[in-house]
Amino acid sequence: MRKTALNAVHRQLGAKMVDFNGWDMPVEYPKAGGLVAEHMAVRNSVGIFDVSHMGDIRVHGPQALAAVQHMTMNDASKLAIGQAQYSALLYPQGTFVDDVIVHRLGEDDYLLVINAGTREKDVNWVTGAAKDFDCKVEDLSDNYTQIAIQGPNGWKVLQKLTDADLTRVKFYWFTHGTVCGLPNTLIARTGYTAEDGFEIYVPTDEATSARVWNEIMEAGKEFGIVPCGLGSRNTLRLEGALSLYGHEISDTITVWEARLDRFIKMEKGGFTGRDALAKQKEQGLKRVLVGLENVERGIPRDGYKVFDLGGREIGYVTSGSPAPFLKKNIALAYVPLELSAVDTEVAVEIRGQQVKCKVVPTPFYKRPKKA
Amino acid sequence: MAFPADFKYTKEHEWIKIEGNTGTIGITDYAQQSLGDIVFVELPKVGSDLTSGKSFGTVESVKAVSDLYAPVSGTVIEVNQELATAPEKVNSDAHGAWMVKVTLKDPNEANGLLSVADYEKFVAEEH
C-alpha cells in the first residue's frame, strides 16, 4: 500500500487508517473527537487534512495553453498567472477521465491537480493528449506533500506561518511565499470542503512534511484546529454537492448529466468531448444529478436504488450520508429528467424499505458570505 | 477499554447480560469505537423473535452501516426507545446503552458465548 510522507504522523495521532484507492490514509482521528467533530471544526473554525495522495501534472512549453485547452473543458485562456479553475479531462464521448483543478503557474506553464485513484490513468491520458503540441508533460505527483487548511479561520492560521499576504489571495487564486521557512511554496486558496481554505504544496521528505504539519497544528491551537480525515472530507464535500470521481462523475457519466454546465465552455473552440456533448445537448438528457433530502427516517447510502412513488426503479444514489452540519440525511442521485424538479418526491430503497425523499436544490450547504 | 465481567460476548462485538431467563443486549465499547459517531439505531419490535447468529437490527455511524447479530435466540420483551432519539448514547456509554431485552429460548445457548477474558483476548488480536 502507498503511504504519504505524513503516515507516521497520522498513526501517532491515533488515526483510524483505511485503504483508499491503494493509499493508507486516515479516515478519522477518534482522539481529536472523530468525524463529526472534524466536520464541525471545518465549518466553524479550522481543520487540517493530508491530501498528498492527490496527483499533480505539470504541462509547460510554448504550446502548453493549446494542449490544456484541447484536453480540458473549461477555458484555460481566461486564467491569469496565479489563477486556478475547476475543470475536467473528458473522453471523446463527453464522459469523465477525471476532474481537475488547472493552475496557471506562468506564461506557458500549467499545473493540473488530479485525483489519487486516477493518477496513472490521468498521467497517461494527459501525455497522450499533449503529444501533438510543443510542450512537456511532467508527473510531479511524488514531489509534493499537499496539506489543506480549511475553514473560516484557515487563513489566520496559515498567515502566522507565511510572509505572503493571504488577504490578497482570492478564492481560486494562488501565490508563492515562504511557509514555515520553506521558500517559494505554492499556496492556493482552494479546497474540497465548500468552505474557505488553503492548500499548500511542500517537499515530500518525511521530516519537512511532519514539521510543517506540526507547525500548522501549533499555530492553529488558538482556533481549536483539529486533524481531519477522509471521512469528514467526504461529508464536507457532500454538503457542498462537490463531485467525487467514481460517484457523481465517471467514464459513463457526461458533463450535462453531472450538471457541471458552468465549468464547460463550449464556445472556447474544439476540445476532446465537445462534439459528443453538443450532440447530447441537442438530443436532450435522460438522467441528471439531483440533491435528495430524507422525508422519512433512514439514511441513503452510496449505491442505493431510487424508485418513483409507484415503485418503478428510476435511478441510484451516487453519495449519501448524514450531513453533520445540516443535521439531515442527504444524498446525490441520478434520476430521470422528468423527476428532477425541486420538491419531487421519490423513494430510496434502504434495506428493502422504500423510504421517501424529496428533491432539493444543491448545494445543500453554502458558506456564509463574508461580512 | 474495560468490559464488564458479568457480560457474555460475541465475535461480532455484541454483549449480553443474562439475569434469570432474561437477556439484555447491546454492542461493546470496542464496537462503538470502530463505528465512530453513531447516528441511527434500528431495532426490532417487541414480540419479534431473534435467532442466534442472525441479524436483528442495524446500527449506523456517519460512515457505515453495521448489522446487529443476536447472541442468543429469544423473544423481544423490551426495546430501548431512548436510542431512537439519542443514538449517540451508544458512543458515550456502550455497556449501559442496551438495545433490546429478550426472553431466552434456551438458557444453555449462552454457554457458547465468549467470556470477558476470551473477548478481551479476541479484541487484542483483532486490533
Image (cartoon, rainbow, N blue to C red):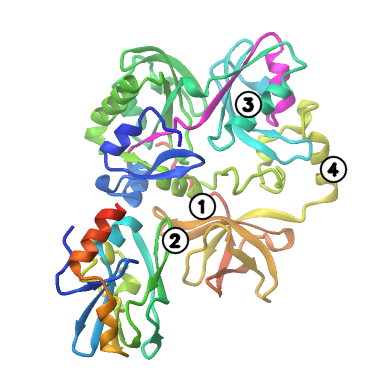
**Residue A128: in magenta span:** no
- Amino acid of disc 2: Lys
Asked if both marks, 1 and 3, belong to the same chain, the answer given is: yes
Mark 2 vs mark 4: which is more N-terminal? Answer: 4
Crowd class of label 2 (few under 14; some 14 to 19; many from 20; radius 10 Å): some
Disc 2 to disc 4: CB gap under 8 Å: no
Crowd class of label 3 (few under 14; some 14 to 19; many from 20; radius 10 Å): many
For the point 56% across and 74% down, the residue is A352
Q: CA distance from mark 4 to mark 1?
A: 31 Å
Q: Secondary structure at mark 2?
A: strand
Q: Is residue A114 left or right of residue A177?
A: right
Q: Secondary structure at mark 1?
A: loop
Instruction: Report the residue marked by disc 4.
Output: A279
Span highlighted in magenta in the image = A45-74
Which quadrant holds residue A151? top left
Disc 2 versus disc 3: nearer the observer: 3
Instruction: Report the residue marked by disc 3.
Output: A123
Disc 4 to disc 1: CB gap under 8 Å: no
Instruction: Report the residue marked by disc 1.
Output: A364
Instruction: Report the residue marked by disc 2.
Output: A328
Chain bearing tag 3 is: A
Q: Vertical placement of B112 versus A293: above or below?
A: below
Viewer-nearest residue: A225 or B71: B71
Disc 2 to disc 1: CB gap under 8 Å: yes
Mark 4 vs mark 3: which is more N-terminal? Answer: 3
Q: CA distance from mark 2 to mark 3?
A: 38 Å
Which quadrant holds residue A59? top right
Image quarter hosting the N terminus of chain A: top left
